[in-house]
């Protein structure tokens, strides 16, 4: 029972990184995949030209960067597309840890999609991964503390951020304070980013939100109009759940955040044996939770294989995890409470240009599962495979007084692959 | 609630059956344990083909159904991407060309509009591979987006106050003296003079508790969806070998058969099939099978290699042992009518199936096509 095992870890952010480190400590073999050119994920992403991190040195050739993992099966097979060649490869592991993080999206604000408008997370990713500093006036709008993190990061890199518009008001933050205060470091980071914004003369409007993008300007819900060259909009964070879907993991609708999430126990075990989901994949709760849950997933694998684990440490990790989860859900609940209800003409699926009205029509027939709505509206049939529209469709179902029943199926191919390369195989 | 007829299943067969019964003036109610068409209709392409039928009853049904599809789009509005774009069957090598010529001649004799083309096929399909030796062309074959057809019918019947009930598992069919009671998981019941089981490969789940069954088996198929691109696919393109796999009734348990069939959709994506295998009710996709499917399609249309595969899925065709659908009453009183066993031809044969079931229930025509489709043919 205590033989070493070969574990695949998908994602090398705080969750995947801590899982990898813990498994390597125990003498197990790890192969880690990351879609980006370098490891680290969205939070601790390293620039292309930075020296190798400690984890990168430990993993060596067992770190496969630039690889899009296309699917995972319940029996431990991982299929991925190589970054350099586009070739599709496959290998089998004893277990798979999915640490794929989260992504941000914005409410279907009328006038979007529009030139110069992306998610705030996309602006941050371009900056961190490629050192790309947006030019001209940057406006960051949406809801929640991430806006300040993203805007402060852009300021420090030399971008001209003119305004941060936060749907959450002081009252919302007051409500969050008790849960947030329990997490050391949280308030410190928040204060530091606020200081950065003040020093760069960034206008901060709280309790205000984006109402529309019109003629290249942002109209706020109080009627104010702001000019921008780049607009970063983030209203919500969504847990990545594509790979758990390919593995056949059971998902549930997570109402506080408004998305489907893989069901796991507190250690990260999913409904499928030997497939674990950690980090933001358990629900969006920030990097501290990610780091703790990654280590817990590693401990679960070790413990399940009969290795002795430090139960005292595990207990402490579980306590921290619960604390972070509570704050994460409290924040999600506040953010969702401030989300505007989009007008019927708003585009919910940008890939296929589907207006909300068409989704409402399907819901009014009594359809409340995502796959049925997909096949009659095309929401989820485009290249993003529903990553962006599924949460919006879920919201439309909730608006009609129902609970979204079941998530979109994703059986394989989380990313497009060249047909020729695919047919040839790896 | 009591109605004349309850249709169970909202796939393409259930949808057209409900529509046909409603149009005969019967009161109809429709139930599905999932959402809209959650089974085979959702995991398929949209073939309405005569080109792949070798002859006999299937060709007769197919030709009738093509007319009914065209009528449907004309009478109800075309909200289902119905497109009589024709189909092209591709032969490679001299032997296949000869066999295809014979196949076309047979169809022409049976009165089907089609032609054999052994030169200049670029006018139909400009991207066929260099080893193409001849094509057959069926100009009246068509394509549809089946889910939109189910949706169109559901919306139109809902507006006419036909109840649609989704997501409620049916736990039992209870045949009585003058009605069948349908019991739902939450205890609700509906009753009707007739119940139509349009539940495809899952038909036996409700029949077996009554000591009844139909010999339908799930035959799995895979489809790859390619992104929009610059490869023009005008008609349905099928490898001549496709006909043989579609009509194969050997029921071989071990093999995965593949044969290329390619269609472009209204939205610009291209669907690539097909595979056939018996793998129980498992709907998971196999990368190996998808690769074979893709390689087959690239063999027929090499330029597909430069597009990207967006997604893939698998579905279960209702396979019937003799290759013919199973349509007719299964219980002694003739109150429970099945409509299944269409294998890969369900979309094509849906309107004619609706017509046959409505004939049976509304007019008492009990043995359509001399019993060739009657479930009794399997009970010796």
Image (cartoon, helix red, strand yellow):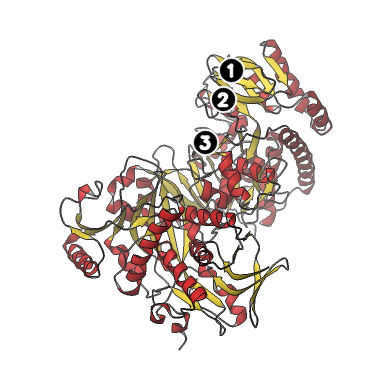
Distance from disc 3 to disc 2, alpha carbons, whole Å, reads 19 Å
Q: Work out whether residue B278 or residue A44 is closer to the camera in this orientation and state it.
A: B278
Q: Is residue A7 visible?
A: no
Q: Quadrant of residue A196?
A: top right
**Observer-nearest of B23 and B163:** B23
- Closer to the camera: disc 1 or disc 3? 3
Q: Chain of mark 3?
A: A
**Contact between labelled residues 3 and 1, with CB atoms less than 8 Å apart:** no
Figure check: A204 above or below B325: above
Judged from the image, the secondary structure of the residue bearing numbered disc 3 is loop
- Cβ atoms at labels 3 and 2 below 8 Å apart: no
Cα gap from disc 2 to disc 1, whole angstroms: 10 Å
- In this rendering, the answer to whether B6 lies above or below A193 is below
Q: Earlier in the sequence, mark 1 or mark 3?
A: 1
Q: Nearer the viewer, mark 2 or mark 1?
A: 1
Picture residue at 73% right of the left edge, 68% below the top: B187
Q: Is residue B98 left or right of residue A9?
A: left
Mark 1 vs mark 3: tell me if same chain.
Answer: yes
Q: In front: mark 3 or mark 2?
A: 3
What residue would you read off at disc 3?
A350
User: Which mark, residue A138?
Assistant: 1
Query: Is residue B283 among the parts visible in the rendering?
Result: yes
Q: Are marks 2 and 1 in contact (CB under 8 Å)?
A: yes
């Amino acid at each position: 029972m205590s033989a070493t095992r070969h574990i695949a870890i998908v994602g090398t952010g705080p969750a995947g990184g801590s899982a990898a480190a813990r498994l390597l400590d125990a003498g197990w073999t790890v192969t880690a995949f990351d879609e980006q050119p370098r490891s680290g994920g969205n939070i601790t992403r390293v620039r292309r030209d930075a020296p190798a991190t400690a984890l990168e040195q430990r993993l060596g050739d067992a770190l496969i960067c630039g690889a899009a993992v296309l699917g995972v099966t319940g029996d431990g097979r991982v299929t991925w597309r190589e970054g350099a060649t586009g070739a599709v490869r496959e290998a089998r592991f004893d277990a798979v840890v999915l640490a794929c993080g989260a992504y941000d999206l914005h409410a279907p604000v009328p006038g979007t999609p529009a030139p110069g408008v992306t998610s705030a997370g996309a602006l941050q990713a371009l900056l961190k991964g490629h050192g790309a500093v947006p030019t001209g006036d940057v406006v960051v709008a949406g809801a929640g503390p991430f806006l300040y993190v993203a805007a402060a990061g852009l300021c420090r890199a030399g971008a001209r951020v003119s305004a941060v518009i936060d749907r959450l008001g002081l009252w919302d933050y007051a409500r969050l304070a008790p849960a947030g205060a329990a997490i050391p470091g949280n308030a410190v980071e928040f204060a530091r980013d606020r200081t950065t914004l003040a020093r760069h003369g960034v206008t901060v409007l709280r309790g205000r939100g984006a109402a529309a993008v019109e003629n290249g300007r942002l109209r706020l819900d109080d009627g104010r109009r702001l000019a921008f060259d780049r607009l970063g909009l983030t209203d919500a964070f969504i847990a990545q759940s594509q790979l758990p879907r390919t593995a056949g993991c059971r998902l549930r609708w997570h109402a506080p955040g408004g998305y489907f999430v893989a069901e796991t126990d507190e250690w990260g075990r999913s409904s499928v044996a030997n497939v674990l989901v950690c980090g933001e994949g358990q629900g969006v709760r920030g990097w501290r939770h990610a780091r703790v849950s990654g280590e817990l997933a590693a401990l679960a694998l070790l413990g399940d294989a009969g290795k002795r684990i430090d139960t005292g440490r595990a207990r402490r990790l579980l306590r921290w995890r619960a604390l972070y989860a509570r704050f994460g859900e409290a924040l999600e609940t506040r953010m969702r409470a401030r989300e505007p209800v989009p007008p019927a003409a708003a585009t919910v699926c940008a890939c296929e240009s589907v207006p909300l009205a068409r989704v409402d029509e399907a819901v009014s027939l009594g359809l409340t599962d995502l796959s049925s709505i997909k096949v009659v509206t095309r929401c989820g049939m485009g290249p993003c495979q529903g990553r962006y529209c599924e949460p919006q469709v879920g919201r439309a179902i909730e608006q009609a007084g129902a609970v979204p029943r079941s998530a979109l199926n994703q059986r394989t191919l989380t990313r497009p692959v060249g047909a020729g390369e695919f047919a040839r195989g790896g | 609630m009591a109605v004349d007829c309850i249709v169970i299943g909202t796939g393409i067969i259930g949808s057209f059956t409900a529509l046909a019964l409603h149009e005969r003036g019967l009161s109809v109610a429709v139930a599905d344990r999932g959402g809209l068409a959650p089974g085979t209709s959702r995991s398929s392409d949209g073939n309405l083909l005569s080109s792949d039928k070798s002859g006999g009853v299937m060709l007769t049904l197919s030709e009738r159904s093509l007319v009914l599809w065209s009528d449907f789009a004309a009478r109800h509005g075309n909200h289902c991407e119905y497109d009589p774009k024709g189909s092209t069957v591709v032969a490679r090598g001299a032997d296949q060309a000869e066999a295809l010529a014979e196949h076309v001649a047979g169809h022409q004799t049976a009165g089907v509009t089609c032609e054999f083309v052994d030169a200049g096929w670029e006018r139909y399909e400009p991207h066929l591979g260099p080893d193409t030796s001849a094509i057959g062309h069926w100009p009246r074959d068509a394509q549809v987006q089946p889910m939109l057809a189910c949706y169109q019918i559901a919306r139109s019947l809902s507006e006419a106050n036909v109840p649609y009930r989704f997501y409620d598992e049916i736990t039992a069919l209870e045949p009585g003296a003058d009605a069948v009671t349908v019991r739902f998981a939450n205890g609700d019941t509906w009753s009707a003079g007739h119940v139509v089981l349009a539940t495809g490969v899952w038909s036996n789940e409700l029949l077996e508790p009554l000591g009844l069954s139909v010999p339908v088996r799930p035959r799995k198929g895979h489809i790859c969806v390619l992104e929009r691109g610059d490869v023009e696919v005008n008609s349905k393109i099928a490898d001549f070998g496709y006909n043989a796999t579609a009509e194969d009734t050997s029921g071989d348990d071990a093999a995965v058969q593949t044969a290329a069939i390619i269609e472009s959709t209204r939205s610009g994506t291209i669907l690539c099939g097909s595979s056939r295998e018996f793998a129980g009710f498992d709907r998971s996709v196999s990368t190996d099978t998808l690769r074979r499917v893709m390689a087959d399609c690239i063999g027929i249309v090499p330029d597909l290699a430069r597009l990207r595969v967006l997604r893939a899925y698998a579905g279960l065709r209702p396979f019937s042992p003799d290759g013919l659908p199973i349509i007719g009453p299964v219980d002694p009183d003739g109150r429970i009518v099945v409509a299944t066993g269409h294998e890969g031809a369900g979309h094509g044969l849906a309107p004619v199936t609706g017509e046959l079931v409505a004939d049976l229930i509304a007019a008492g025509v009990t043995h359509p096509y001399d019993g060739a489709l009657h479930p009794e043919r399997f009970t010796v």
